[in-house]
Amino acid sequence: MISTRQHSALCIFRSHYIQNLLSITHTQSKPLVSHKSTHPAPASVREVSTPPVHPSIALNPPISTLPPPLVLPTSEPNLPVTEKLKLYYKTGKAYLTFYKSGVKATWQNYKLTRQLRRQIPSGKSAEQALRDGLLSRAEYHLIRRTRRDVSRIPLFGLVLVICGEFTPLLVVFVGLSGPVPRTCHIPKQIESTREKLEKRRRESFRDGTVPMKETEDFKDLQKLPRPILIHVGKSLGLYSSLWDKIRVVPTLLLPRRIQKTVDLIDVDDLAIEKGGGVIHLSEEELKLAAEERGLDVVGRSKEEVRSVLGRWINARKRASIIDLLCRRPSAWPRV
């Protein structure tokens, strides 16, 4: 249980944290909300009242958890050598600016999550706080994404210092995506990663993974049949495609990774439903949520992704997450 004061502070934080984050200039010395008043409030209304949070704010994390816009100089055909060199220089400078903005956004997110974590009672994880209603989905994903991005900053910073403007070449052509924070993913990198993952998923379904019976629900993922274990791992990208090339699958590692992913999807499904549904998710959040559930997004419109994600949320009332992961949307149970 949390005190009235803690609850009030959490509500105030929910109403104002996005506006503070989008300004990118967050100062801890300045209070989020002023409590000064020239007229004392009557005793009957001295409790803190907060405006309701709009569902889109409660569901969508701040845009600083996503990559900033990448603005590249335009190229023209048949440029002279000197103009090409200038173009390459401007392009490299644009990428460096993009990466610096992404790293700066991660740092600002980190400072904000430190403040947010103070509102979570001691001993509770972010996932537990989300289940208990102490965090909104937006706040939870801010914490989760920032935790992941911060862990990647040291290695990515080293790569950026060594390679400079050549970093995008390593990311796109060499496939160096592991150490790159999400806030520094360039558009080609995002698209390439999605296409490769969806190709693996199609191949896995084509190989003939047998769906489980609709009533079958594995509580212990250690007991998952090997074909389903491999299919879920491929579909969600839980192990590198290099394992496929050497025809070895890390089946000893997969149950733990699948269990962690299933738990995250489960709590996120609950948060989306409680927050008002997929109708309030932004386009990029729709794609990210669909990706996490093994749903294809490449070449699909926002409304198509919203529709299939909404069907997933509804199908969860009659099927387990593992069951849905082993079926194409056309084979999901109808509600």
Image (tube, helix red, strand yellow):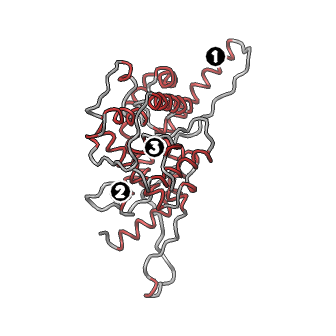
The part of the image, by quadrant, that contains residue 228 is top left
Is 301 situated above or below 117? Answer: above
Amino acid type at circle 1 is Leu
Which badge, 1 or 3, comes first in the chain's sequence? 1
* Residue ID for mark 2: 117
Q: CA distance from mark 1 to mark 3?
A: 44 Å
Which badge, 2 or 3, comes first in the chain's sequence? 2
The part of the image, by quadrant, that contains residue 181 is top left
Q: CA distance from mark 2 to mark 1?
A: 48 Å
Q: Nearer the viewer, mark 2 or mark 1?
A: 2
* Residue ID for mark 3: 293
Identify the residue at horizontal 39%, vertical 63% (top origin): 133
Identify the element where label 1 is drawn. Answer: helix
Amino acid type at circle 2 is Arg
Q: Position of residue 160 (x, y in %)?
A: 45, 27
Which badge, 2 or 1, comes first in the chain's sequence? 1
